[in-house]
Image: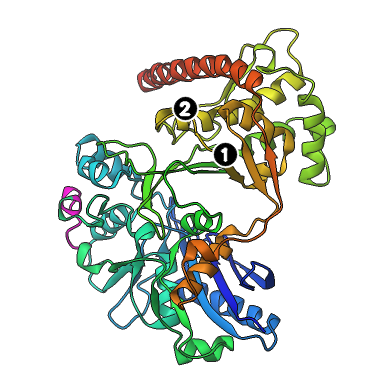
Amino acid sequence: MSELRIGLDVGTTALKAAAYRADGTCVARAERTNRVLRTGPGHAEQDMEQVWKDALACLADVVRGCGNAVIQSIGICGQGDGLWAMDADGRPVGNAMLWNDTRGATDLKALFEAGRTDPIGRGSGTSLWPGTSGILWRWLEQQGGGATAEIATVFTCADWIGYRLTGVVATDMANGSIPFIDLEAQSYSDAQFASIGCEGLKPRLAPLRRASERLGGLTSEAARATGLTEGLPVSVGTLDLAAMILGMGLDQPGQTMLIMGTTAVVNILTDIADRVPSPVGASALHATSDAIIRIMAPSTGAAAFDWFAQLHPQSLGGETPAEVAGKLNALVVKVPVGANGVTFIPYLNGERAPFVAADITAGFHGMRSDTTKADLGRAVMEGTAMSLRHCFESHTGLPSEPVQLTGGGSRNAVWCQIIADIIGQDVVVSEQSDQGLWGAACLGATAAGAGNAMDLVRRTEETTIYTADPERHAAYCAVYQRYSTISTAMRRLQKDLNSLKDAMP
């Protein structure tokens, strides 16, 4: 009987674990809800001990599902950023503060306006947000009363679980990239810590290692709780996004992965970092190679589709997402490229890539008395796809190779074709949706000596390829110019509107 490899993915809202054969066949899988605690305005926290207990429960469920099979290894990935702190005895210091915590937003705005974040942008290719470790550390220090005095170690979610499984502290290059790494040196930068007054944080950060390395062996405590073998190899935890990219077999500059989830994410593998004072998005080192992952996340993805469908519950409602999509798609396919002159600017939740404007709003442009619901529906699907193209255009231009697409929107064939035609490149959608778990599992196997991770991730997957149509792409190039022009004008208009608000009594 072949050995099995386990992948563990500790996300913001769910924990998942799965056991795989070497060919990628999933033998057992388990899942638990991960609860986010909203303890105050802007707070997003999780109980570190509860997360650990749920991770153990997931692993135990998977082990029971494997019967008498031999388990080879465990690989870990998880939500990134935030501030997961423990004391010198390995106990949590309060709840974990998550990547989407915003309590430090005002402080960050002041740092940005004073130019103090510029060294971080130039060094790490990342634009800070409130849920990054440095801003959260500053918030804790500003509370007074020695709020940081007990803290001996600061790391990420995957690092916390790795520590509890093995007793060893480390973070991988992907997780460690944001926000204090110098991408060129691939090490922490004193100047970047000093720029925002976080010198006290540096000695508390976990040391940097590769995700393909063996973090340590499973402790006796973790072995008893899960039914696994003491000493079982566990790999250094990595960022969930990095594990997903590896699980798709991507590790070279020029390759691209898109996520069309509730929000969208454009992930471009490159050897060129956006090292400027105010970069858009974030940069993270690949889990195993020296490629840099440029991460740009427009604020609105499939949420725009859901929003529009909910405006028309009588005609576009349904019992399932597939039924809703089917009804809207039936209207959209009858509308030509460009939605009969209607452009949707998809800033329903502000925008964060390829530019940052939290206050900008969404809207339709070009409506006339004969504009139909079908026109508007098509414009919504085109507008969200245009925001993906906008990210590409702001970096190095449109992709030169086929693009991998995942997320809920990837199940909508009409939308996938629109995306392919707009970016002018084939879009590849896998029937599998577990690439993060699979990538983590293969990193664990690599740490156990089974071979190179990029060789191990190769498996047979059923895929659908949406081929870009040259004529429609040419037509969409003109539509994109319209979209870009309106987007630029909207940013200017929003500033004018804001000045009117400021002038109101």
The quarter of the picture where residue 405 lies is top right
Would you place residue 324 above or below residue 217 in this image? Answer: above
Does 31 sit left or right of 204 as displayed? right
Return the mark for residue 360. 2
Task: Identify the main secondary structure in magenta.
Answer: loop
Q: Which residues are magenta?
A: 192-201
Q: Is 39 colored magenta in this rendering? A: no
- Residue 79 disc label: none
x, y percent for residue 278: 29, 36
Which residue is at 57% across, 85% downward?
226
Sooner in the amino-acid sequence: mark 1 or mark 2: 2
Q: Which quadrant of the structure image shows residue 286?
A: bottom left
Instruction: Point out the image quarter for the C terminus.
Output: top left
Q: Residue furthest top?
A: 369
Q: Is residue 193 magenta?
A: yes
List the residue tagged with mark 1: 402
- Disc 1 crowd rating (10 Å Cα; few below 14, some 14-19, many 20+) is many
Q: Provide residue 129's location: percent of width, then percent of height.
A: 36, 46
Q: Amino acid at mark 2?
A: Ile
Q: Is residue 180 left or right of residue 385?
A: left
On the picture, is 45 further left or further right than 467? left
How many C-alpha atoms fall within 10 Å of the one at disc 2: few (<14), some, or many (≥20)? many
Kind of residue sitting beneath label 1 = Pro
Residue 162's x, y, as percent? 43, 75
Q: How is the image coloured?
A: rainbow
